[in-house]
């Protein structure tokens, strides 16, 4: 056996154990009885320990080194490159550090939940301080060239830096503010409240699942269940699980959550089976993953041709209230732009300003330009600046997201990267494929999905994310296509009146 | 750390991995999408490999030896005894043998399924021959004193032998035949067909789950789902999963399946949490497990006081057809004795004759007193002899059960042991507790469950199964109480007329 073959044989069971952990987590969020929480944590920590132990085994390091010197085909070379990346990242964090971080974030998550319930930032502040100390340590362990925050970003979006992300995000801010300005002055604002119509859960489920299947999510190799927060997880391309939550009064919220997760799910189902249990069989990055969910949720699911097809069916499925709306009113409502406090409920425009706020604040916190004590005020200032909103109560402001309590600094930017990649893929697809809007209107999604499979899914981690996007679209990743998309879509919607 | 403490620390993660395997198997039977079968097998085989590797580690053997020489409290002593038993059993089977058996049974299960579908024993015969060869080898590896079949029995019911099981089963045959004789001559026979009334699945689910909760199955620490065959699995006393299947036309079949599985489930929920992840936190044996399911399904769930309480509610839940029946007619119908071909649909009396047939045939096969080629004929002869039935088609005869294709020789007897233990526990409970029937009639099941918890559940594997039953009931395990129960219940039902 070559060193590369031995390497894959060593890594394969580690990947299998990782996928078993995802089964346990899926079960915990969807099926597990309440009383089982503590024991499930023990099962997961045992698996995690096993994976970490095996993945940091020096024998793996030696095989990596030996494999690097062998003549390898391009796939093998990419696998070695990515395994080396993962191995080195895992080795860089001492196991006491990992254990301490797990202990601290378990406490911090509880403190955050209580602080949010009681609307009191001070209860969370001491935990956030400790987490930041550890996060700065983590950045040192991981290493970086210019900015410790780069090390954090790189965990979630390989190769991303404050500089590269900043260069993509900065033009957004101005342009989005410009569009927002038009929206705010338009008499055609609003309309979101017209979607607040009670629809029985079962109806919502049926309609959402039917559409997910029609756009290409394969239910023979996946399911749709209910959890508190929607998510998607894949154990294997043939076993991909979506979840959503049903809000009786907000049927479109559940519907778009299903489209979003189905987008993630189709990526998982489209990963190359022949490279399963190696890096080339894995998704490229969080940003690329998010591009797939946002593509289907927004670029397709909030487009006019999509609703030309589905609005009549929705009217039939969701009942009388929608029968009184015209297609145009409905389309306007699902694209209503309304600056609001809550990120996860934001429209596709202001969503990115929420991310920008978090990105700037985290980066300042990590670099000690901002102190935890000053965070609530800084939050409110940015909210006023970017979204024109008055200071909210902490629960709807600085305490709204779980991420910081989990130590996930550097994660937020991947959401906006996803939006930008999605728009860039959209532009390329529209150029490449004749009559995309007709395809959508006719419910012929197969060529669209096929294009994504070919350009994105089938490559797994073969290319680093920025290279993947560049190859898929013919241009370096940037915010340009997103801005063009936003202007083209929203200015006509809100101009005049 | 003492050797015993080191031993427990070594064993704990192995038990955790075992429980993770049960989560994967539960998911595979209830939730998993169809396309995922092959990958799930890979996940399970990886876990199995890990558990086997760790459980046969000579270091574990050395710790066992050292622990045996330490001063130990009774719990620790029992844990060492049972771990040693499991360790030695695991070590006795060479890993090539285990792998070959896995390969062979995977093929044999497929061949069996096809043979059953096509009603053709010859398709299965060559596989059964090979399996028997391996099973005889297995008995040699495991070791025995008198009869190779003892080694097989002992895997499922520690300490059981052909002699001990035979001594319990033999008197059954005659006595059951005697009761059957009365039944067959009675004009009050039949009534089962009156239960064939369509009831919507959701109604069945609600009623079954409500009753399971009332008898004591805790849904905060468990769930009820649907699978092809009903089963129960426990990952931890706080996470116990029941399944059933709903047959629209046979609502009582689903209902008794739920009671049966809830009996298993309450045992799992009653295992001592303080000994979790050690043998003293595990169920005592398959026979003891089955005694708990049969106790609730039959001794309680097919009793008159039980239906005095629940029949009015069933009439309400299951609709008009049952409103035309009297309580007595209904009670008679759920206790109808009707010799039939299919074991899993048999009444509580003839069920044991089905087991007797399988026990005698397996024992003869293992000891080469019977050849695979002669098996169908031998089956039909015994069916005629014990149940008075004419030869069935193979699919409803010798091919009906999956067990042999899985290599599970020695497993069937535990079903009847469960029935006998259940009746023996019932007799002791009726002696110990005043007015059990009034409790049942009033839906006060807590004292009954408490008695089982105290006498059976909380002991885990502390006592070997026969000792557990003897201590719980005050008498050695035997078929006497079962026979008395059967006579007392069925002779009046069928006498006269």
Image: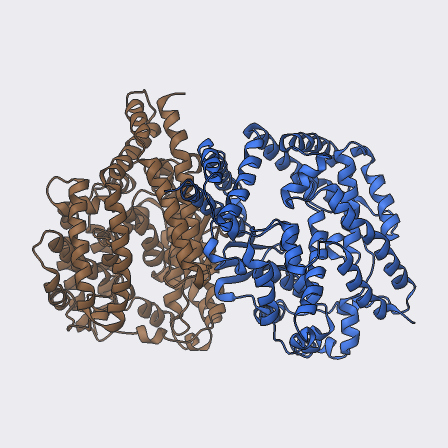
Chain colours: A blue, B brown
- Return the x and y of residue A160 as percentages of the image width and height: 69, 44
State whether residue B10 is above or below residue B226: above
Please name whichever residue, B5 or B174, is drawn nearer the observer in this view of the structure: B5
Report whether A151 appears left or right of A446.
right
Task: Please say whether residue B161 is visible from this viewpoint.
Answer: no
Report whether B101 appears left or right of A37.
left
State whether residue A174 is above or below residue A442: above
Report whether B130 appears left or right of A182.
left
- Return the x and y of residue B480 as percentages of the image width and height: 19, 51
Residue appearing at x 57%, y 52% in the figure? A283
Residue A435: name its quadrant: bottom right
Please name whichever residue, A44 or B473, is drawn nearer the observer in this view of the structure: A44
Residue appearing at x 49%, y 68% in the figure? B202
Please name whichever residue, B121 or B268, is drawn nearer the observer in this view of the structure: B121
- Return the x and y of residue A330 as percentages of the image width and height: 76, 73
Assign the N terminus of chain B to one quadrant of the image: top left
Residue at the outermost left position: B369
């Amino acid at each position: 056996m070559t060193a590369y073959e031995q390497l894959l044989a060593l890594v394969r069971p580690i990947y299998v154990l990782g996928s078993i952990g995802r089964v346990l987590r899926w079960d915990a969020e969807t099926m597990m009885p309440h009383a089982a929480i503590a024991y499930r944590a023990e099962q997961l920590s045992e698996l995690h320990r096993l994976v970490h132990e095996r993945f940091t085994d020096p024998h793996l390091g030696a095989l990596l080194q030996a494999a690097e010197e062998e003549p390898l085909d391009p796939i093998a070379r990419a696998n070695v490159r990515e395994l080396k990346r993962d191995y080195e990242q895992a080795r860089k964090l001492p196991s006491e550090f990992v254990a301490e971080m797990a202990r601290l974030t378990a406490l911090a998550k509880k403190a955050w939940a209580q602080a949010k319930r009681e609307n009191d930032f001070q209860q969370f502040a001491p935990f956030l301080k400790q987490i930041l100390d550890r996060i700065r340590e983590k950045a040192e362990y991981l290493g970086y060239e210019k900015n410790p925050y780069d090390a954090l970003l790189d965990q979630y979006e390989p190769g991303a830096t404050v500089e590269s992300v900043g260069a993509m995000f900065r033009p957004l801010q101005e342009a989005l503010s410009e569009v927002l300005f038009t929206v705010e002055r338009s008499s055609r604002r609003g309309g979101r409240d017209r979607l607040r119509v009670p629809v029985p859960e079962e109806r919502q489920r049926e309609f959402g699942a039917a559409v997910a299947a029609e756009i290409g999510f394969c239910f023979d190799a996946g399911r749709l269940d209910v959890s508190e927060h929607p998510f998607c997880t894949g154990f294997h391309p043939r076993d991909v699980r979506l979840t959503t939550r049903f809000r009786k009064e907000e049927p479109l919220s559940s519907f778009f959550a299903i489209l979003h997760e189905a987008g993630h799910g189709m990526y998982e189902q489209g990963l190359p089976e022949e490279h399963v249990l190696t890096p080339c069989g894995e998704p490229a990055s969080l940003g690329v993953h998010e591009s797939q969910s946002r593509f289907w949720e927004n670029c397709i699911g909030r487009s006019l041709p999509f609703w030309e097809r589905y609005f009549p069916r929705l009217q039939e499925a969701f009942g009388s209230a929608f029968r009184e709306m015209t297609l145009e009113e409905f389309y306007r409502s699902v694209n209503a732009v309304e600056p609001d406090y809550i990120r996860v409920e934001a429209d596709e425009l202001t969503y990115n300003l929420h991310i920008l706020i978090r990105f700037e604040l985290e980066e300042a916190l990590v670099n000690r330009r901002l102190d935890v004590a000053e965070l609530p005020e800084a939050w409110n200032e940015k909210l006023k600046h970017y979204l024109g909103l008055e200071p909210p109560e902490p629960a709807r402001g600085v305490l709204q997201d779980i991420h910081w309590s989990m130590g996930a600094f550097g994660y937020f930017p991947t959401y906006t990267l996803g939006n930008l990649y999605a728009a860039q893929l959209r532009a390329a697809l529209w150029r490449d494929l004749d009559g995309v809007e007709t395809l959508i209107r006719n419910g012929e999604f197969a060529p669209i999905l096929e294009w994504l499979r070919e350009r994105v899914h089938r490559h797994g981690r073969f290319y680093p994310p920025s290279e993947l996007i560049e190859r898929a679209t013919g241009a370096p990743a940037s915010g340009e296509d997103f801005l063009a998309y936003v202007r083209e879509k929203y200015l006509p919607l809100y101009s005049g009146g």
